[in-house]
Amino acid sequence: MVATSRTVRRTYLTLVLLNALAVSFIWGINSLLLFQAGLSNTEALAANACFTLGYALFEVPTGTIADTWGRRTSYLLGGLMLFATTLLYWLAWRVHAGVAVWAGVSILLAAGFTCFSGATDAWLVDALHFLRWPGRLETVFARAQVYGGVGTLAGSLAGAWLAQLTDVGMPFLVRAGLLLALTVVAWRLMHDIGFTPRPAGSPLRAMRRVLDASIRSGWRRPALRWVMLGAFVAAGIGYFVAFVQKPYLLQLAGDQQAYGLLGVSAALTSAAQMLGGLLAGRFRSLFRWRVSVLLTGVLLNAALLTGLGLVGRLPVAMAMLAGNSLVSAGVLPSRQAYLNELIPAGERATVLSFDSMVGSCGGVVTQPLLGRAADMWDYPAAFVLAGLLQLVAVPLLLRARWYENGRLTAGPPPGTRTRRTPRPSCPPTPSRARE
């Protein structure tokens, strides 16, 4: 079949939909699985921090796979690894494993996800550029938010109600089956277009080349570096909110077995994600700079998380969680387009993986910190702290906005000291000389 920009976009959206369906099947009850195994908030979030540590450890090696052997190879490997590690997650629950086992399985689970991160978006952008598609990347990424919301809505609802009817382990078995099906679909539909595999050489040499490219094309470019550092703070907070909102909602409801309620909450956040994707273009049109969209999203989410901790009512909490999802989905397409347009084509998957690694490193620190806050005080206090930590990204994004598109906006970067140079003295004009 001859590839066209339409078939490429359709394949990308299909993969996003099926991936969201499979991954979200356990979202309503995943943290409850660890609590049933006897872990405290600190231990559970420490195990989840090992998941983000796995992201940090494997992003560069899997970026090597995507930029040497191909985006399709990386995606298929990720599907198979997630299938196997999801079964390991279920087995750890069955044997009531300790925190060390959960940490190890979480690191392996993250390795599978890193094969997806960077490779999927790089596959899309490579193909559309090769086929000379005239559209804007934001439109595809925004539509992907809608498709991802549909998959998340269906998966989270079905998984939560399945847990209500059976137990919290059954959705993990269904998820493993869905991930295997996703891998088969990707094998049939996904083919590298506009990308030529490179000779890999030795693995260490390939990883060094990828790391050098990440630093050269990503970290050393201020317009990219400050946006990545903004994610260093935000990524861990996002993991924390997704993990802790389930026991917090059950606490507000006064029923620790109300798994169906968690499905309803996940459905609301998924619907908000779809709405955010639909409104992403409208959000972008309100601002001159893409980074201004990111700044607004940080401020809104900081207010929502703080309000989530201060207002202890179940309907309001569910509404604020949905609002957080709406804002994040509305902002993400601008961030994706911003990064992809500044990264060279041959190193796109590499730098995108490096960006994900930076965010994961922040999550390793943030999650145990917030989990400890939840154990020492309570969930509301931890949400307030998360809202305040979100504001750390504001000065970083202000600097990124100054560098956006390689041009200066107004004045020097925030916090930069400028040296006033004396104006050179001018010789008197002939008229003044006569005076």
Image: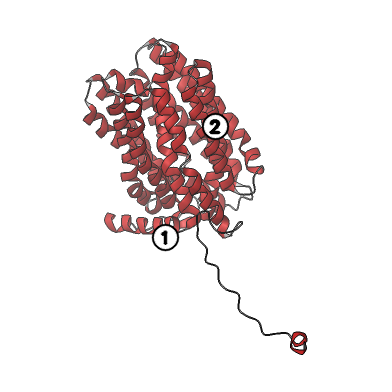
On the rendered image, what quadrant is the C terminus found in?
bottom right
* Residue wearing tag 2: 147
In the image, residue 106 lies at what x, y percent? Answer: 30, 33
In the image, residue 190 lies at what x, y percent? Answer: 47, 42
* Residue wearing tag 1: 216
What residue is rendered at 47% in x and 58% in y? 221
Amino acid on which the number 2 mark rests in the picture: Tyr
Choose mark 1 or mark 2, whichever is in front. 1
Most extreme residue toward the front is 435
What residue is rendered at 43% in x and 37% in y? 389
Of 260 and 17, the residue lying toward us: 260
Few, some or many residues within 10 Å of mark 2 (<14, 14–19, 20+): many
Task: Note whether 198 is above or below 11 in the view shown.
Answer: below
Q: Residue 262 carries which label?
A: none
Using the rendered view, name the quadrant where residue 255 is placed: top left
Query: Which badge, 1 or 2, is on the more N-terminal residue?
Result: 2
Left or right position of 383 against 435:
left
Left or right position of 353 against 284:
left
What residue is rendered at 32% in x and 35% in y? 49
Contact (Cβ within 8 Å) of mark 1 with mark 2: no
In the image, residue 361 lies at what x, y percent? Answer: 35, 43
What residue is rendered at 53% in x and 27% in y? 150
On the rendered image, what quadrant is the N terminus found in?
top right
Secondary element at tag 2: helix
Q: Is residue 27 visible?
A: no
Few, some or many residues within 10 Å of mark 1 (<14, 14–19, 20+): few
Using the rendered view, name the quadrant where residue 167 is placed: top left
In the image, residue 392 lies at what x, y percent? Answer: 45, 42
